[in-house]
């Protein structure tokens, strides 16, 4: 069975709800012409060759260099004021994480690895720098771990089994959707060696165990997930999910579309704000870099500020306080939180939702761009325990020079030590010290 067939055979694919494709932004007119210089060598390049051929291009050289392992900063934590407050992260003794299934799936995966694969993939410490070495671009910047499109079908299935038992059905569907659209993009531009449904890296940290902490990462183009597990508790974050284009309009998965809830609910919420609420929420009227201050736009992240290598960033609260929202508006904020976090198993999501709501008096909603017409925009939800960003981007493999609604990036971080399970690890160690 071919690599793409492994993903194609998964049963949920045939159950996806088709959308009316004339109701979403068209990308067909944005496909690059044959021989487009930017991707001329893509069809003949492996992932490693694509990186090596690109790392000295002036427009991307510094960016790719910043993603290298040797340039990572010591971890401090993502905060609003530079002070990490681990105390805001409250975890119950058991939050219903499917620890037994996850542990078994992880051990089964390890049993299928060669000694060489184990050496590249298994890290002793859950605080290893490699846990933080995720990156969203297609460039194979930091080789190591399992590169799924270089692995056997048996290994691929075992990795996806671990992902599936670690997440809710809807969350796993979303992860698979990112993989499928990445493969669809590769087909569109004849770049299947670099962009395919298995061009992702997997790494595992610590020893899978029902009690002791361990973690894993799964990352590549438009999909980056860090999962930390300890007993019946788990943290998924930071995460990056995106798509270019954001839907499939041809082939066996026609109608698959991502981020519909995030898009429709955010617009509904913004349009529901009163004039006074809107004045607070709306930071800038345009998403174009020429209309924004220099510190509001970066060449590769655009309006995002929580992306790769931003683990220690200080981001002050901005926008409209959720505390002055009415009940329907607060419900929309909760719906957006659930959409960003739907990968959590249902019992764990219930706890994370409760923690999020408990900080409503310190939660802010901010917006950049238009909201009355069908134009691209950016929004952010920020609290002591949540940081969610949604942004429409310019083309990377499509040719649109300005943001378009068919290229979406989403980022989900957990401030104050929530990222990478650091606060959960601290709580576990403090508890162990009390009983030792």
Image: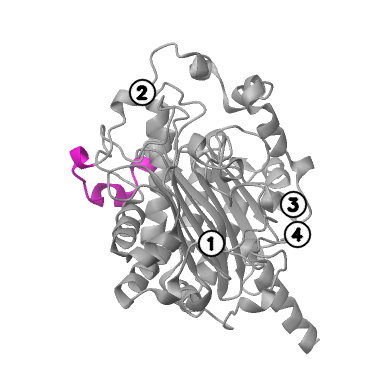
Question: Which region is colored magenta?
Answer: 6-23
Q: Is residue 149 above or below residue 351?
A: above
Asked whether 254 or 283 is in front, the reply is 283
Q: CA distance from mark 3 to mark 2?
A: 38 Å
Q: Are marks 3 and 2 in contact (CB under 8 Å)?
A: no
Label 1 sits on a secondary structure element that is: loop
**Residue 31 shows which numbered tag?**
2
Q: CA distance from mark 4 to mark 1?
A: 36 Å
Q: Earlier in the sequence, mark 3 or mark 2?
A: 2
Say which of marks 4 and 1 sits in front: 1
Q: CA distance from mark 2 to mark 1?
A: 36 Å
Q: Which residue lies at the image location 57% right of the left edge and 23% below the top edge?
A: 46
Residue 5, position in %: x, y?
37, 37
Q: Which residue is mark 1?
A: 318
Residue 241, position in %: x, y?
47, 48
Residue 325, by quadrant, is bottom left
């Amino acid at each position: 069975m071919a690599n793409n067939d492994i993903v194609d055979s998964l049963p949920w694919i045939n159950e996806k709800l088709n959308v009316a494709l004339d109701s979403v932004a068209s990308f067909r007119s944005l496909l690059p012409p044959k021989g487009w210089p930017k991707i001329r060598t893509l069809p003949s390049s492996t992932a490693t060759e694509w990186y090596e051929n690109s790392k000295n291009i002036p427009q991307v050289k510094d960016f790719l260099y910043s993603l290298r392992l040797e340039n990572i900063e010591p971890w401090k934590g993502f905060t609003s004021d530079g002070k990490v407050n681990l105390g805001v992260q409250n975890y119950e003794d058991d939050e219903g994480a499917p620890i037994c299934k996850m542990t078994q799936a992880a051990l089964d995966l390890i049993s299928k690895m060669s000694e060489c694969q184990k050496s590249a993939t298994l890290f002793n410490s859950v605080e290893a720098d490699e846990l933080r070495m995720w990156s969203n671009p297609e460039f194979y910047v930091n080789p190591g771990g399992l590169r799924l499109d270089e692995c056997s079908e048996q290994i691929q299935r075992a990795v996806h089994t671990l992902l599936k038992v670690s997440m809710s059905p809807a969350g796993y569907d979303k992860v698979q959707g990112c993989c499928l659209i990445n493969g669809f993009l590769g087909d569109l531009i004849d770049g299947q060696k670099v962009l395919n449904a298995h061009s992702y890296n997997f790494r595992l940290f610590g020893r899978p165990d029902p009690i002791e902490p361990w973690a894993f990462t799964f990352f590549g183009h438009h999909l980056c997930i860090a999962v930390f597990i300890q007993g019946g508790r788990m943290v998924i974050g930071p995460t990056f999910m995106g798509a270019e284009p954001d839907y499939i309009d041809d082939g066996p998965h026609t109608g698959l579309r991502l981020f519909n809830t995030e898009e429709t609910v955010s617009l509904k919420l913004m349009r529901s704000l009163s004039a006074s609420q809107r004045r607070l929420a709306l930071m800038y009227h345009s998403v174009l870099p020429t209309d924004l201050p220099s510190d509001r736009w970066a060449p590769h992240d655009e309006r995002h500020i929580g992306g790769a290598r931003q683990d220690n960033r200080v981001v002050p609260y901005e926008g409209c306080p959720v505390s002055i929202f009415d009940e329907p508006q607060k419900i929309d904020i909760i719906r957006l939180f659930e959409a960003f976090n739907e990968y959590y198993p249902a019992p764990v999501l219930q706890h994370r939702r409760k923690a999020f709501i408990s900080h409503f008096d310190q939660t802010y909603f901010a917006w950049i761009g238009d909201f009355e017409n069908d134009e691209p925009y950016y929004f952010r939800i920020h609290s002591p325990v949540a940081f969610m960003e949604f942004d429409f981007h310019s083309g990377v493999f499509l040719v649109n020079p300005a943001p378009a609604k068919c290229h979406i990036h989403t980022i989900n971080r957990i401030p104050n030590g929530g990222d990478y399970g650091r606060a959960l690890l601290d709580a576990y160690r403090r508890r162990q010290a009390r009983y030792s």
